[in-house]
Image: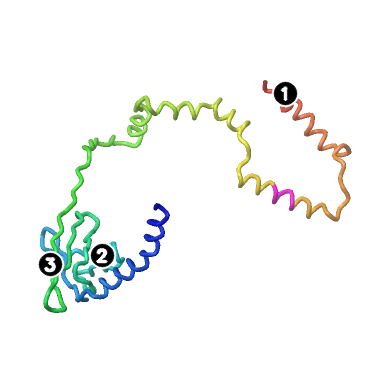
Amino acid sequence: MKHLIATFFLLSLPFLGWSQNSDESAKEVIQFTGVVLDQDSIGVPGVHIYTPIYGRGTSTNSYGFFSMPALEGDSLIISAVGFKKSRYIIPAIDGQTLKVIFRLEPDTTVLNEVQVYNLPPTADAFKKAILAMQLPSQYDNINRNLDPAVLKEMYMTLPADGSMNHRWFVQQQAFYEQRRNSVPVNPLLNPMAWVELFKSIKRGDFKNSN
């Protein structure tokens, strides 16, 4: 029984779509024109008038005027930034032209209170005020992340990113192109290399940090 109902439903889908298209084609096409105004009776530009079902619509010009073809019974949405959305259903009329006037309501959002303080009179006083300012406790992680020990550990342990890997590869490729046709140099026979080695040992570059 379930398979029979499913088969009947699948076979009836093309007829349902055909009936919907037939109903849409049977409706009268009218020229829908009008103007969109705000609370001060001023034309609102850039207002979208569209029907989400069929994907038809238009926008108002700089004077708030619009004109579009529509079908009787279309459910339109009128929306604009800063105004509340409104809906309008195209009624059945005798003629082929419908003219309307829409008045949008503003969508006002109340922001939180902001306190504005006077700035210090001089640059030095402003600098001292910034340094003396105490941040809330939730910003303590900023001081922890800027600690010199943490920054040094990050410098020693963080791997190279993509740009550093690319720079290293380009440098190696350039070095290879420079040395490709020359005789390889043994650094053990270079006195300057020995000098740099002794300097590194004195600086403690080879000491284990652990």
Query: Is 31 displayed left or right of 9 in the figure?
Result: left
In this orientation, which residue lies closer to the viewer: 73 or 206? Answer: 73
Distance, label 3 to label 2, CA atoms, is 16 Å
Q: Which residues are magenta?
A: 169-173
Q: Quadrant of the C terminus?
A: top right
Query: Which percent across, then down, holds residue 69?
Result: 23, 74
Looking at marks 3 and 2 on the same chain, the residue that comes earlier in the sequence is marked by 2
Distance, label 1 to label 2, CA atoms, is 73 Å
Does residue 44 show up?
yes
Distance, label 3 to label 1, CA atoms, is 83 Å
Query: Which percent across, then down, holds residue 16?
Result: 32, 66
Query: Is 19 displayed left or right of 193 in the figure?
Result: left
Does residue 46 show up?
no
User: What residue is drawn where x is 33% and y is 71%?
Assistant: 18
- Which of the numbered marks, if any, corresponds to residue 101? 3
User: Crowdedness of circle 1 by 10 Å Cα count: few (<14), some, many (20+)?
Assistant: few
Q: Main secondary structure of the magenta part?
A: helix
In front: label 3 or label 1: 3
The reply to whether dot 3 and dot 2 touch (C-beta < 8 Å) is: no
Query: Which percent across, then down, holds residue 157?
Result: 62, 31
Quadrant location of residue 74? bottom left
Tag 2: amino acid: Tyr
In front: label 1 or label 2: 2
Looking at marks 1 and 2 on the same chain, the residue that comes earlier in the sequence is marked by 2
Q: Secondary structure at mark 1?
A: loop
Q: Is residue 69 above or below residue 186?
A: below
Report which residue position mark 1 lands on.
207
Query: Is 4 displayed left or right of 103 in the figure?
Result: right
The reply to whether dot 1 and dot 2 touch (C-beta < 8 Å) is: no
Report which residue position mark 2 lands on.
50
